[in-house]
């Protein structure tokens, strides 16, 4: 069992916080990652959507049996460890914890993260805010998984 925390950073222009819809600990928010088997190292060719499904006391979000080595693996989402990425984090290139995952045999990768209504897979997003009458932008989006001890 390995606890991995998804860390994000980005430059936020005229935005205060970046977080999944519903908040950083929203167990129903979809995370898109590539999956690598912790046993044989086989990487999934496509991104896998990780969304929590209530099951007993844990939030089981993904279970698989590796097609190549047959090992059973899963990932469990653990709410309560995330926080929004702030403007200050982005200015200092600091990372903010987004979600904690309990990984059992799977090693996720952060290629192509997508957020509802906003596609950040290219690492950028820009729009014009009618209310604030100013352009807003998210750029230099980066993400990584860190082992949480």
Image (tube, rainbow, N blue to C red):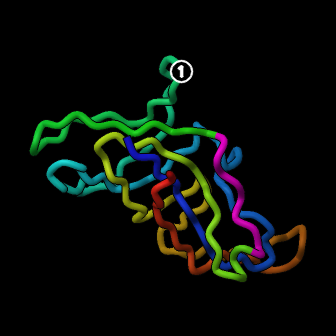
What span is colored magenta in the figure? 80-88
Determine the secondary structure under disc 1: loop
Q: Position of residue 52 (x, y in %)?
A: 51, 34
The residue nearer to you, when weighing 118 against 130, is: 118
The residue nearer to you, when weighing 119 against 15, is: 15
Residue that mark 1 sits on = 57
Q: Where on the picture, by quarter, is residue 41?
A: bottom left
Vertical position of residue 11 compared to residue 98: above or below: below
Q: Position of residue 115 (x, y in %)?
A: 57, 56
Q: Position of residue 124 (x, y in %)?
A: 57, 76
Q: Position of residue 127 (x, y in %)?
A: 70, 74
Q: Where on the picture, by quarter, is residue 63?
A: top left
Q: Is residue 66 left or right of residue 62?
A: left
Vertical position of residue 76 compared to residue 113: above or below: above
Vertical position of residue 40 compared to residue 92: above or below: above
> How many dots with numbers?
1
In reply to whether residue 16 is colored magenta, the answer given is no
Vertical position of residue 55 compared to residue 65: above or below: above
Farthest-out residue, right: 132
Q: Quadrant of the N terminus?
A: top left
Q: What residue appears at the point 55 percent right and 62 percent down from the top-left corner?
A: 7
The residue nearer to you, when weighing 112 against 105, is: 105
Q: What residue appears at the point 10 percent right and 42 percent down from the top-left corner?
A: 69
Farthest-out residue, front: 149
Q: Is residue 11 left or right of residue 29?
A: right
Q: What residue appears at the point 64 percent right and 47 percent down from the top-left corner?
A: 81
Q: What residue appears at the point 78 percent right and 71 percent down from the top-left corner?
A: 15
Characterize the local packing of mark 1: few (<14), some (14-19) or many (20 or more) Cα atoms within 10 angstroms: few
Farthest-out residue, left: 68
In reply to whether residue 84 is colored magenta, the answer given is yes
């Amino acid at each position: 069992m390995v606890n991995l925390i998804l860390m994000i950073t980005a430059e936020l222009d005229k935005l205060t916080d970046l977080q999944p819809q519903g908040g950083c600990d929203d167990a129903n928010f979809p995370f898109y990652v590539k999956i690598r088997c912790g046993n044989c190292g086989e990487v999934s060719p496509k991104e896998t959507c990780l969304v929590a499904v209530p099951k007993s006391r844990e939030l089981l979000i993904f279970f698989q049996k590796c097609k190549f080595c047959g090992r059973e693996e899963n990932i469990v989402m653990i709410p309560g460890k995330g926080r929004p990425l702030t403007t200050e984090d982005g200015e200092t290139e600091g990372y903010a914890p987004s979600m904690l995952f309990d990984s059992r045999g799977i090693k996720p990768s952060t290629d192509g993260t997508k957020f509802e209504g906003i596609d950040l897979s290219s690492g950028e997003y820009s729009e014009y805010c009618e209310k604030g009458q100013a352009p807003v932008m998210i750029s230099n989006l980066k993400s990584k998984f860190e082992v949480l001890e």
